[in-house]
Image (cartoon, rainbow, N blue to C red):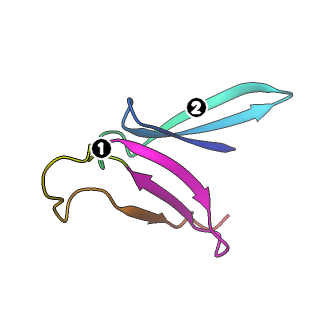
Amino acid sequence: SYLVAALRGKALHRLTFAGGAITDEQVLLSGTYGRLRAVVEGPDGAMYVTTSNRDGRGDPTRSDDRILRIVPPPA
């Protein structure tokens, strides 16, 4: 599987591949945290997703940009 963060779509996409073709797509966190900037796997096996909801204007609040830690369920 491959995870892709989507700014405009405000979701995390999980793509499954077979033979170079996408065989399945799941849309995760749709609209839950706003615009998602990037996703990486940490050394602990968790996925870290950053949000990008501020444009540099105003004063940030607790609900604005953050780093989300997502722990995959056991296999």
Report which quarter residue 20 is drawn in. top right
**Residue 31 position in % (x across, y down):** 30, 40
Q: Residue at x 18, y 46 (%)?
A: 57
Residue 9 part of the magenta segment: no
Quick one: SS at disc 2?
A: strand
- The quadrant the C terminus occupies is bottom right
- Identify the residue position indicated by label 2 in the image: 25
Pick out the residue farthest to the front: 57
**Looking at the magenta stretch, what is its main secondary structure?**
strand
Q: Count the labels in the image.
A: 2
Image depth: mark 1 or mark 2 in front: 1
Classify residue 60 as left or right of residue 35.
Answer: left
The magenta span reads 35-51
* Mark 2 closeness class: few <14, some 14–19, many ≥20 residues within 10 Å: some
**Residue 6 position in % (x across, y down):** 46, 36
- The quadrant the N terminus occupies is top right
Pick out the residue farthest to the top: 21
Quick one: SS at disc 1?
A: loop
- Identify the residue position indicated by label 1 in the image: 34
Measure how far apart labels 1 and 2 are at the Cα level: 20 Å
